[in-house]
Amino acid sequence: MSVMVPCSDVTAVSTIANNRIGERTTVDGKEYVYVKAVAAVLQGDCLYQKPISATVLMHHVWKDQSADCGLVAGVAVVSMASGEYGWIIVKGHFATVRSMNDIALKDALIGHTVDGEADGDATSTNEHFVFGFAMSAATTFTDDNGSSLDCCEAMLTNCLYG
């Protein structure tokens, strides 16, 4: 079931779950999923499902690409500390996807070995991991914590949670 929330709510984070984990919403044609960050993440980070265990459930995310799931689950809308809850974007246009500094317009995007980054160079053998397409070349932005990071605008089309 999709619940409509005001657009400002998809930027809210909390130390308690204010929505059901895995809840989906659509705002301005973009799709979001409510998650728990199990490690600190920055605005624009490419996030992955943490391997499920007795203490880690579905929709518990982190930015560690080296774990079992190589497909990006979604992108952090805002920074979250470990243990915080918030929304990630899983489908639609997003202006600040953290990326390598050599991303070019129209690059197919996959997760990069640098945690949290998107890569556009290694897609020839990893087409099944493409989660979106660059709508701009990489540029530098300042995130909501004041960190200067490389990013690109992207259209997210195939995230794990999408």
Image (spheres, rainbow, N blue to C red):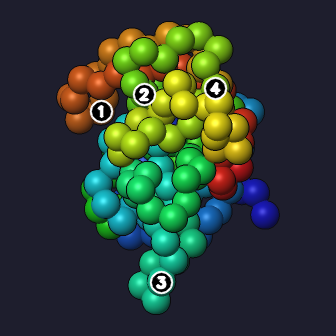
Q: Amino acid at mark 4?
A: Ala
Mark closest to the chain's N terminus, 1 or 2? 2
Residue 134, visible in the rendered structure: yes
Element at label 2:
loop
Instruction: Between label 3 and label 4, give the one nearer the viewer.
Output: 4
Q: Residue furthest left?
A: 146
> Do the residues under discs 3 and 2 have CB atoms within 8 angstroms?
no
**Residue occupied by mark 4:** 108
Instruction: Between label 4 and label 1, give the one nearer the viewer.
Output: 4
Mark closest to the chain's N terminus, 4 or 1? 4
The answer for how far apart the CA atoms under marks 3 and 2 are is: 29 Å
Mark closest to the chain's N terminus, 3 or 4? 3
Query: Where is the N terminus found, in terms of image quarters?
Result: bottom right
The answer for how far apart the CA atoms under marks 4 and 1 are is: 26 Å
Instruction: Between label 1 and label 3, give the one nearer the viewer.
Output: 3
Q: Position of residue 88 (x, y in %)?
A: 53, 47
Q: Amino acid at mark 2?
A: Ser
* Residue 144: mark: 1
**Residue occupied by mark 2:** 99
Alpha-carbon neighbours of circle 1 within 10 Å: few (<14), some, or many (≥20)? few
**Residue occupied by mark 3:** 53
